[in-house]
Image (tube, rainbow, N blue to C red):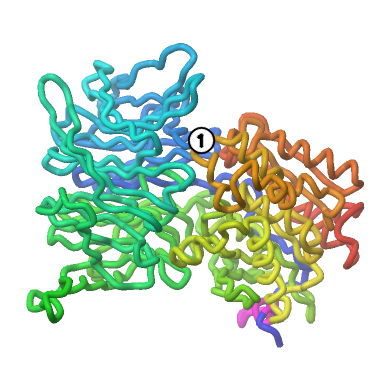
Amino acid sequence: MTTAARQVSDPPGGPKSVARFGWWPSPFTPARVAAGKVSRSGLLADGSSFFWLESRPEDGGRQVMVTDRSGDVPADVSPATVSIRSRVHEYGGAAATVAGGVLFYVDQVDQRWYRSPVGDGLPPVPLTPEPPPGSSARYADGVVTPSGAWMVSVEERHDSTGTVHRLVAVATDGSQQMVLLADPGGFVAAPRPSLDGRRLAWVEWHHPNMSWDRSELWVADLAESAAGITLANPHRLVGGDDIAVGQPRWCRDGSMVVMADGTGWWLPHRIPADRLDDPDSAVRLVDLDAEFHAPDWVLGQTTVAELPDGSFLCRMHQEGRDHLALVHPPDPGATPGEGGGPPPRWEVTEVDQPCISISGVAATVDGQRIGVLGATATAGMGVYQVSADGSVPAVRLTPTPAGGEDPAEDDIAVAEPFVASSPAGPIPGLFYPPTSAIARGPEPENPPLVVFCHGGPTGAAEPGFDLLVQFFTSRGLAVAAVNYRGSSGYGRRYRRSLQGLWGVADIDDCTAFAEALAAAGRVDGAKMVIRGTSAGGLTALGALVRTDRFGGAASWYGVTDLEALATDTHDFESRYMDGLIGPLPAAVDVYRQRSPLYHPEAVTGAVLLLQGADDPVVPATQSERFAEALSAQGVRCTLQVFAGESHGFRRAETIEACLTAELEFYRSVFETEPGAGGSGSEPGPPGIR
């Protein structure tokens, strides 16, 4: 009996009903999944309370600041009707902070910073002025200086001359006074004032690099006076060829910790307080094949928290999942190696807690409360209170976003690590078997497969609970999430293995992964489809051009024209493809060779395109042109464009409509005779929603 058959066998408590794969009755309705797609981000601590941002799909995707008020029931603290979201780099992030009981946030509508004391009920005060006519300004990643008089922030300005990224200081008194601190001519992120207010650290990088390719840590002297705020003596501390840095953090003793990947892995490095003027003075704290940082697609990544004893709690990604690691100094008796070698490495102890995907770590100043923002194998992204030594059981502070009810464990598919072999080497990923408390598939059949291609492409498939995965597995479909070449979480070498090969290696890896599952008897190799979002959409659609293994592809705001993406996209990603494919115009033929738009006649399966009308990253014209080209070739294609949606759908009604369309699309493909490729097939019978 195959492993897949064991997954759908009868439970000890009684027989399951037999139903076709893909048509099982499911508790995860489109409406429930849409309502439960609550994103949480930006976990931080202020005083004795935790704060985080939380989206509201049922309210058009509005994002609000929430607090647990020192362990009480979570409550909204941002102004009613306001949506907090930054558009810096289009992906935003770090759109709010809290300091001394005062909330500072970026309003999604006008992109200005506002001040709103928590709980006083007074109208918010704008801190940044309106930009001059013909220009626009966006802000993010703001941190209030120790004096409380200024907030240092990333600014992105747009005008007729182009886009500029700078560091500015914004007065917090409402005077709308602003001071330019640094304009390096590239990109800036993570401005962090020291705890004594005398220095400022930040990260910068320049085209054609992305921050995870090559970036640098800079430090300068910071001074405040009655006349304003100034920056002096800027100098690079960490960086260079083949080094990427992130998350600079000042420590209580005046030293700094930063994540750098000079060894090939993002590891914590410490710069002593007395060497902050010496370039390349950072000392690596640990020697591990593990990632303590991730690509900065959004600003404000915070997965490190200092405890009162000088140790650190860090997210550590290893072997396909996240761990919470306590990084602490070595025993007092430890000595440097012979000949005055480097100081002994710090020790790493894993902290017992339930999350296997972690996106935030925070601790109160006194260390009495430690928060983790993460997902478990059976519960979506939430905030947990944990203890540094694991002696106290973790407590979830946020309700499970699944229609107000926790799903039954027997209905939840848990990620299984799976590694496929290929000529290029091992391909890691996750396999989710069909799972239901009441249904099983007909024997000896194996289930159809839906391959998930993550976005980025410098991204990763995470093993934490995802309602979207459960939407399919609970209906009898298997899901594979592939960490193809170029994915993060496996070190710099693997992350850069997609260089020059995007549109080829990612497709080959996803195909090889699916074929390996079929060869292992886990899925039906004649019934496989592929899906992706954004960059993952290119992989999914390209798979129908490069191979005939998939009966159809579904793309959510996916790329179809690489040349248009390179020339029309926003500044942040405008040179991203120089490394992934090649610089333009020299590599234009390669761009067109790997763009599905230019090969509609080669498409071997049906296509579903789901697109936001207001997408600035992948404009709707890409999907519209591809749909027209497919129709002209007689390829079955459905295009749905959603007004008011951008890059990443946020409205509950949009998500519900997309899930309904995607499920029916897969059912129609699986009803097609093997080898028909999905073209011209009629939709399958309606199923249980």
**For numbered disc 1, what is the local secondary structure?**
helix
Front-lying residue, 308 or 411: 308
Report x, y in % for residue 44: 29, 46
Give the vertical position of 536 relative to 653 (above or below). Answer: below
Locate residue 627: give its quadrant.
Answer: top right
Q: Which residues are magenta?
A: 4-15
Q: Residue, x 42% and y 13% (percent of image)?
A: 132
Q: Residue, x 38% and y 34% (percent of image)?
A: 185
Say left or right for 438 vs 368: right
Say left or right for 155 vs 573: left
Asked if the stretch drawn in magenta spans residue 427, the answer is no
Front-lying residue, 349 or 474: 349
Report x, y in % for residue 46: 23, 43
- Mark 1 belongs to which amino acid? Asp
Q: Which residue is under mark 1? A: 571
Asked if the stretch drawn in magenta spans residue 12, the answer is yes
Say left or right for 488 vs 222: right
Mark 1: give few (<14), some (14-19) or many (20+) Cα within 10 Å: some
Front-lying residue, 234 or 429: 234
Residue occupying the far top of the picture:
133
